Amino acid sequence: MSGDATLDVRHLWKVFGPRADRVVGTPLADLSRADLLARTGCVAAVRDISFRVSPGELFVVMGLSGSGKSTLVRCMNRLIEPTSGQVLLDGVDVGALDARGLRDLRRHRIGMVFQHFGLLPHRRVLDNVAYGLEIRGTGRAERYRRAAEVLELVGLHGYDDAYPDQLSGGMQQRVGLGRALAVDPEILLFDEPFSALDPLIRRDMQNEVIRLHREVGKTMVFITHDLHEALRLGDRILIMRDGGTVQVGRPDEVVGAPADDYVRDFVADVPRSHVLTLRWVLRARRPDDALDGPELGADVVVRDAVRTVLSSTAPVRVVEDGELLGVVDQDAILRVIVAEDATTRPGGTPAVTAAGAA
Ligand SMILES: Nc1ncnc2c1ncn2[C@@H]1O[C@H](COP(=O)(O)OP(=O)(O)OP(=O)(O)O)[C@@H](O)[C@H]1O
């Protein structure tokens, strides 16, 4: 059962090369990517990847160039045929779809946003946004109505009649985003959409995705090689290396408890106060702690709690579901800020565990 996951990826493999179908399920599958290549000439682009994306979640897949992200995302709608494993979209096995089902999936159910916008240069912005509706057979009046609505949503109001080459890169990317949104798909897949944009415009577009995600509540899978982008956007992040999964977790988990040295190195320069939540810095309440301090939730990010903690003489009480998890005092906050560039918390586990055990 896929439960109520919008996307459920199970033991997905994609092997390229000669006799690629004879790798999974044999001892060859246990070889590292490099050894497999040396022994067989095959590349395991995606190695046994499993994850579930809940309705409305923004799920990020992050990895360096060659880690297998693009192959993985293309396996979702079978632009690349997986070697083995399953992809379920709202419980429907994508691998079992016939040509017609697949066409329906790509037109109606999955929207894609790429780095290269793939806009139609001779068509106006409005027609580009309406394009998905047009190939779906939606009538002219209805598709223009919807396209105008989406243009407003992606901040392109007034650009209906412009042509793509009259727009900046960021604006063209908004058109691409609008086109994907116009058909109201169940899930949006972003394949490194902002990699070619200038840093400031890129930041703008990230904010745009965050805003849109909040406003339309769409389930999203976002592929990136940029850790900071992943941490900004992701409800959860899957980190890939050499085709496999290194870690899946919330941003605070990836930064607070890196799964291995690879992730630890990766997150070493992340400002911890921007990502860690109070859960990671609280301690168990001591009998002499004053309990009349302010109350904050365990998922409040340290940076957002600094003012409250530093302006209170009593420790801040950290609560979750009405229960006191522990307290955060000024020392704890200052330690995070002062040690911003330290690599990991000793022990690497949320402080709530330590507090609970104390
Ligand atoms: N059609 C193919 N035939 C053979 N090998 C391939 C093919 N497509 C991808 N690969 C290999 O699979 C691995 C994963 O590639 P993929 O493009 O998915 O990685 P990526 O993380 O998306 O990298 P990038 O960000 O550079 O696109 C790489 O080693 C790549 O060379």
Image (cartoon, rainbow, N blue to C red):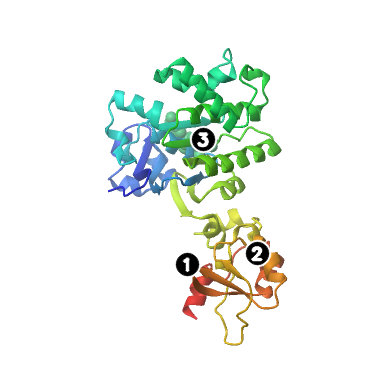
Distance from disc 3 to disc 2, alpha carbons, whole Å, reads 34 Å
| 231 over 277 or under it: above or below | above
Give the quarter of the image for residue 115. top right
Q: Is residue 29 above or below residue 121?
A: below
Q: Who is closer to the viewer here, 126 or 169? A: 126
Q: Residues under labels 3 and 1: Cα distance?
A: 37 Å
Q: Which comes before the other along the chain, label 3 or label 1?
A: 3
In the rendered image, residue 97, in percent from the top left (x then y), is placed at: 28, 30
Q: Secondary structure at mark 3?
A: strand
Q: Residues within 10 Å of mark 1 (few under 14, many from 20)?
A: few
Q: Which residue is mark 2?
A: 305
Disc 3 within 8 angstroms of ligand 1 (CB): yes
Q: Residues within 10 Å of mark 2 (few under 14, many from 20)?
A: some
Is residue 339 at least partly visible in the picture?
Answer: no
Q: Amino acid at mark 3?
A: Asp
140 in relation to 229, above or below: above
Q: Quadrant of residue 172?
A: top right
Badge 2 element: helix
In three-dimensional space, the C-alpha distance between marks 2 and 1, rounded to whole angstroms, equals 18 Å
Please give left or right for residue 159 compared with residue 252 in the image.
Answer: right
Q: Residue furthest bottom?
A: 288
Amino acid type at circle 2 is Ala
Residue type, label 1: Asp
* Residue bearing the label numbered 3: 191
Q: Residue at position x 47%, y 67% from top? A: 321
Question: Badge 1 is on which residue?
Answer: 321
Which badge, 3 or 2, is on the more N-terminal residue?
A: 3
How many numbered tags mark residues here? 3
In the image, taking residue 6 as reference, residue 180 lies left or right, namely right
Query: In terms of sequence position, does the residue under pointer 2 or pointer 1 come before the other?
Result: 2
Q: Is residue 325 above or below residue 187?
A: below
The residue depicted at 54 percent of the width and 66 percent of the height is: 298
